[in-house]
């Protein structure tokens, strides 16, 4: 049991919260019906907190330390990272919640229960202030309930206050369908609120060492009392526009008014120090929304999404609905698989948690793509358990993210499910894969002895090359793979890859193999500077 929230605890909270969000990403996506049923809230929260964790890990990008406390600096880094990487309305609000934490606790010498309660109140207030037209029955209501419970606790024991806030947040989440008709009609709770509950539970686990037990949310009753006097508030606009903005506060105030007249779901949050803002709005006139940002300051990282192009998963299981669950690690790989329509499970998990992810897809036919033999064994266990629930789950034995991407690329809902699984398995099997890493110890491999620090290139799981130079080894393994034939090379850049590595590999392929297509993606995977797929 922790008596105070120090910098190490903040880091564990961020990491634990991210693991929890990733574990429940598919579930949250399929809860998402408000304000637009685009099935992306879980994904947006994961990407937002991933950015926060990356900011904590990259301390060379520190903000000036406005407070004397290490935990304050960690919270500021976490909030800044979330702001810069916030995705969607839910991500923007989460970034503002984290900023409320950071602003309140940065200079507090010792964070105990009453300080945590004050931080939760500031976080809830900041969240409401970020939204142009706050709606109850959303993440905002859950944040406010957590703050009230923390204040009512009236204690200075950190664990007591954290538990009180998390427990009341869970209760408030259960009440969201009574507040928002869109949720009641779909028989679900609020997706953003669910995400916040997971983060608060992760905080409880860090502080107390115990994970709160919560009832499963899948299959909630549709017979919920609703306040029908509330308006639907469902967005009717065609586009989501989001960008980062460097601007002065006065210009941002004018921007809020202009964007408020153009659309809805407006949320604008800033860091309060560097003059950077994250702007999110739903509009019909994309050009006007971006032009308003140009007038206010310097917009960058501009993103536009047309809602009609997004998958809109049903909120109840359907006999013909299909889904894919991919086991993968790396923020870029997660984004690629998500963009391909898959639910991604990352981190350490059990067969029961994998089964939960399968059930959260709300599909009757699910294909699971593991990434190693151990995960494959768990996937088979989950598939057997799913069959007892009337679900059809097939496991395609992928062993690398490049194989999973190849399998996802050939999915065709027009085929019979069994035929689709066969096609995915054939595509995965036809994709040879390689992984480049550094040897951690001396060993005897099929390619000869290696020493710590040597560069290893493994093809289909076996060491084929041992080198001293990373680039030379990467180009050599690609040449060896293409020597056996191939038309498409996929390169996934690792989190620790040196700058220019994949561009150099790509140029080598273009020069040496002119008839081969090369695709390069930021994979973000740990331990492997480069993953290669050849099809």
Image (cartoon, helix red, strand yellow):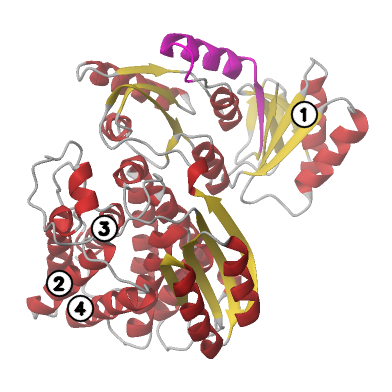
Question: Marks 2/4: CA distance?
Answer: 7 Å
Question: Marks 1/3: CA distance?
Answer: 47 Å
Assess whether mark 3 and mark 4 are in contact (beta carbons under 8 angstroms): no
Q: Is residue 188 above or below residue 518?
A: below
Q: Residue at x 46, y 73 (%)?
A: 261
Question: Marks 2/1: CA distance?
Answer: 55 Å
Q: Residue at x 31, y 87 (%)?
A: 108
Determine which residue is flagged by label 4: 117
Assess whether mark 3 and mark 2 are in contact (beta carbons under 8 angstroms): no
Q: Earlier in the sequence, mark 1 or mark 3?
A: 3
- Dot 2, crowdedness within 10 Å: few (<14), some or many (≥20)? many
Assess whether mark 3 and mark 1 are in contact (beta carbons under 8 angstroms): no
Question: Marks 2/3: CA distance?
Answer: 19 Å
Please provide percent x and percent y for residue 132: 37, 74
Assess whether mark 1 and mark 2 are in contact (beta carbons under 8 angstroms): no
Q: Is residue 458 above or below residue 233?
A: above
Please provide percent x and percent y for residue 524: 59, 47
Q: Is residue 158 above or below residue 68?
A: above
Residue span colored magenta? 413-436
The residue closer to the viewer here, 220 or 469, is 220
Determine which residue is flagged by label 2: 161
Determine which residue is flagged by label 1: 477
Answer whether residue 23 is magenta in the image.
Answer: no
Q: Earlier in the sequence, mark 4 or mark 3?
A: 4
Q: Earlier in the sequence, mark 2 or mark 4?
A: 4
| Quadrant assignment, res 488 | top right
**Residue 449 as seen in the image, left or right of residue 206:** right
Determine which residue is flagged by label 3: 193
């Amino acid at each position: 049991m922790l008596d105070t929230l120090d910098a190490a605890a903040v880091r564990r909270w961020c990491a634990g919260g991210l693991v929890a969000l990733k574990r429940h990403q598919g579930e949250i996506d399929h809860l998402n019906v408000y304000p637009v049923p685009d099935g992306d809230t879980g994904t947006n929260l994961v990407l937002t907190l991933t950015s926060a964790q990356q900011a904590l890990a990259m301390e060379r990008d520190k903000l000036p330390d406005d407070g004397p406390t290490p935990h304050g600096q960690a919270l500021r880094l976490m909030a800044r990272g979330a702001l810069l990487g916030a995705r969607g309305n839910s991500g923007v609000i989460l970034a503002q919640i984290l900023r409320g934490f950071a602003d309140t606790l940065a200079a507090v010498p010792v964070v105990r229960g009453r300080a945590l309660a004050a931080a939760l109140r500031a976080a809830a207030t900041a969240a409401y202030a970020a939204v142009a037209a706050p709606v109850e029955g959303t993440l905002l209501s859950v944040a406010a309930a957590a703050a009230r419970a923390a204040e009512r606790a009236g204690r200075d024991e950190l664990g007591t206050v954290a538990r009180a806030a998390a427990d009341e947040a869970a209760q408030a989440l259960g009440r969201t369908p009574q507040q928002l008709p869109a949720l009641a009609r779909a028989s679900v709770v609020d997706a953003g609120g669910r995400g916040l509950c997971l983060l608060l539970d992760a905080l409880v686990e860090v502080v107390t060492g115990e994970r709160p037990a919560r009832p499963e949310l899948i299959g909630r009753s549709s017979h919920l009392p609703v306040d029908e006097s509330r308006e639907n508030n469902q967005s009717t606009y065609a586009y989501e526009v989001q960008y980062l903005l460097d601007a002065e506060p006065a210009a941002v105030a004018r921007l809020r008014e202009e964007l408020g007249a153009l659309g809805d779901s407006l949320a604008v949050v800033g860091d309060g120090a560097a003059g950077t803002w994250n702007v999110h709005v739903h509009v019909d006139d994309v050009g006007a929304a971006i032009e308003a940002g140009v007038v206010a300051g310097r917009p960058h990282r501009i993103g536009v999404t047309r809602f009609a192009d997004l998958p809109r998963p049903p909120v109840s299981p359907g006999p013909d609905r299909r889904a894919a669950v991919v086991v993968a690690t790396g923020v870029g790989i997660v984004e690629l698989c998500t963009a391909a329509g898959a639910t991604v499970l990352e981190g350490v998990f059990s067969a029961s948690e994998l089964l939960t992810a399968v059930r959260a897809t709300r599909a009757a036919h699910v294909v699971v793509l593991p990434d190693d033999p151990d995960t494959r064994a768990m996937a088979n266990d989950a598939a057997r358990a799913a069959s007892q629930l009337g679900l059809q789950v097939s496991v395609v034995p992928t062993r690398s993210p490049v194989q999973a991407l190849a399998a996802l690329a050939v999915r065709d809902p027009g085929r019979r499910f069994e035929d689709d699984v066969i096609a995915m398995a054939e595509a995965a099997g036809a994709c040879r894969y390689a992984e480049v890493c550094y040897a951690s110890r001396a060993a005897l491999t099929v390619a000869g002895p290696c020493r710590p620090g040597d560069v290893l290139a493994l093809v289909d799981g076996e060491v084929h090359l041992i080198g001293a130079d990373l680039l030379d080894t990467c180009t050599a393994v690609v040449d060896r793979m293409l020597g056996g034939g191939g038309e498409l090379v996929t390169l996934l850049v690792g989190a620790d890859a040196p700058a220019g590595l994949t561009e150099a590999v790509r140029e080598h392929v273009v020069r040496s193999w002119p008839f081969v297509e090369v695709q390069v993606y930021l994979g973000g995977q740990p331990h492997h500077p480069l993953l290669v797929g050849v099809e």
